[in-house]
Each structure stands twice: as structure tokens, then as C-alpha cells.
Amino acid sequence: MQTYTLRFVAVLLLFLGGRAALAQVTTPKYSNEFLNIGVGARALGMGNVQAAVASDATAGYWNPAGLLRLDHKYNVGLMHSELFAGIAKNDFASFAMPLDSSSALAVSVIRLGVDDIADTRRLQNEYGYIQYDSIKFFSVADYAVLLSYARRSNLVQGLRLGASAKIIYRNVGEFANAYGFGIDAGAQLERGNWQFGLMAKDITTTFTAWTHNVEALEEAYLQTGNELPENTAELTLPRVVLGVGRSFHFTDKFTGLLAADIDFTFDGRRNVLLKSDLVSVDPHVGLELAYAQTVFVRGGINNYQQTKNFDGSMATRMQPNFGIGFRTNGLNLDLALSRVNDRESNAIAANNTSSVIVSLGYAFN
């Protein structure tokens, strides 16, 4: 009972209690941050480095300009990953296809959710007795649908342009839900073995409107002395990602790809490598080695942070990522290991909560 209660209170505190203090329209840090976790085992194994090198069905998410690099007419991508020792599930599905030699489109769906959260508000009846059959369960989930389009530029040779319109739906059981809309835009450019990319997320400043079911929580809020949440609107400020990649051909069959992305955010000081009140800069690096374009080994480093230990000392941490892949006859199978938390000294449980990401792709004509 205690575990159910703590989990329920924590979720409500995170998603509802904190919003009661927000103004009617806000621009909070980490707004719609579920859209920045990343999709695809290839990308996550490379430390989320994809702005310049995205070229498969996941390009609608990473950089829609990469849809023009599809090798087949029909391309399907699926991903499943579990974060924080399986508490959160992150799923992705995409379908992409070229329209002609100069344009392509894709439809992508993302879901990040925590399921089976116990609602213990009615655990004790009016006579003071515990009734476990009164426990109900709900989910907290974030959804996004991306409609992407890409087209070759007639002005600059090798330049590809793309854009994605995204529709957002966020739900906290019967307690709150939100709808949002935004637009991303991207570009890619190839020059020999070099690849360059630019991805501008939320260029329109994504608008998300929250509606709270006050009646469902009014009694609990009054008993705890909290203010009732109000309907609010969040504005997600733009994020700009600059990417560069360099391919290498060691032999006829042995090749490599070294790439780096630099994220620029403008929603306040973040815990990244370079930070200020105006802009925060977060670089990440990825490497992919391939044999005969069939077997792949990947690695990447991202998520640079400085954390404070219980003794007051500061520790610098980075997130290593690893992955492998196999491709044959249009079928791609990719696995990645993403270290979300590697036994931090200030973690209460001090457990390794590495996440395993599985991706399956199929391309055919």
C-alpha cells in the first residue's frame, strides 16, 4: 500500500502540483521534453547524433531532409525501449516513402508512457477500513504524430530541405490532458565525404494547452492545503541542432562514420557543457563502423552534466552509449544500450538503470 501511495503522489506532484504555480501562459524549461529523448537504436547507440546523417524512416524525427536519402520505395521503422528499469516505455513507429526523385514524405508516431499507476484515493472507505479492490490504475502518457515532407533544392546542388508538422497529445489519466501543435524544419548538405545538417525544432514556438479536471482532485488538494491547478498554456521555445559527419573507406568492405551534433537551446540555463541564461550548448559525438554495410558497431557520448554528491562535492558525468546492427535484404535489426544512470553516488538505490533499445526496420520496393 505504501508503494502504491508514494507512486501515485509522486506522479501527481510532477504533472499537476507543479503546474498550479504556473502563469496562464508560460515558457518553462524542458517543455515537451519527451520529444527530445530520441528514437531508433541506431541513433541512440550513437549518442543521439543524427542531424547530418539521418537517412532512414526515422529521419522524419531527426531531420526530415534525410528522407530524400531513402534507398527503397517503402520504408517502415519500429522501436521499443524501456527507461528507468522498465518504469517508462518509449515506442516509435514510422512509414516513409519517396514521392518522386525530388520529394519524399513520412508519418511517425511517438508514445512515452508510465502505465499501471495506482490511484489509492478510495483505498480507505468511510468506515476507516482498507479495501484493496477499490484501487484503480491509470497511465501517464505523451503522444506525438509527425507529418514530414522533404524536397531537393534547385538553388544549391546537394542541398535537401524538409519540414515536420507535429501534433501533440499528453494525458494524465482522468486528471489532466493537453493538446499541442508545432513545426520543425531541417536541411542537409553533402560535399564529398562530408555531410552537414541543420535541424530547427519548434521554430513556430510550439503551443500546448493544458486542461485540468479539478473536480477529480478537489478533495485531495483541499485536504493537503494545495492550490487547485488552473488551465494553462505552455510555449516550447525553439531548439537548433547543428550536425556534421565524415565518412571513411578503410577497405572495399570496411567503412566508418564519425559525426557530431551541437544542440542550442534558448529556454534558460541548462545543466550542459556550456550554459548561460540566454543560450545553452550541448555537444554529443557518435561513431559507426560497418562491414560490407551488413554488420554495424556503434558508440556515442552525450548528456554531459555536473551533479552534486551527498558530501557536497561536484561530479562530472557523461552518458556512454553502445549499439550493434545487422542489415540484409532490406531488413534492419538494431540494438542499443543507453546508460541513463550508471550508479551515481547520490542515487538512493544506486542501481544501474541502463536502457536497452530495440529497433526493427524493413524497406522494400
Image (cartoon, rainbow, N blue to C red):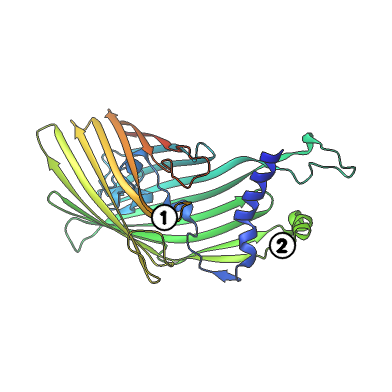
What's the residue type where badge 1 is placed? Answer: Ser
Quickly name the residue at label 2. Answer: 226
Residue lying farthest to the top in this orientation: 328
Total labels: the figure holds 2
Q: Dot 2 lies on which element?
A: loop
Q: CA distance from mark 1 to mark 2?
A: 34 Å
Quickly name the residue at label 1. Answer: 313
Q: Is residue 322 left or right of residue 87?
A: left
Is residue 365 visible in the rendered structure shown here? no
Q: In the picture shown, does residue 184 fall above or below 296?
A: below
What's the residue type where badge 2 is placed? Answer: Asn
Residue lying farthest to the right in this orientation: 127
Q: Is residue 338 left or right of residue 13?
A: left
Q: Earlier in the sequence, mark 1 or mark 2?
A: 2
Return the residue nearer the eye: 349 or 25. Answer: 349
In percent of width and height, residue 255 lies at 16, 37
In percent of width and height, residue 131 lies at 81, 36
Q: Is residue 120 left or right of residue 361?
A: right
Residue at the spot 77% in from the left edge and 58% down from the top edge: 218
Residue at the spot 26% in from the left edge and 46% down from the top edge: 286
Residue lying farthest to the left in this orientation: 251
In percent of width and height, residue 282 lies at 33, 58
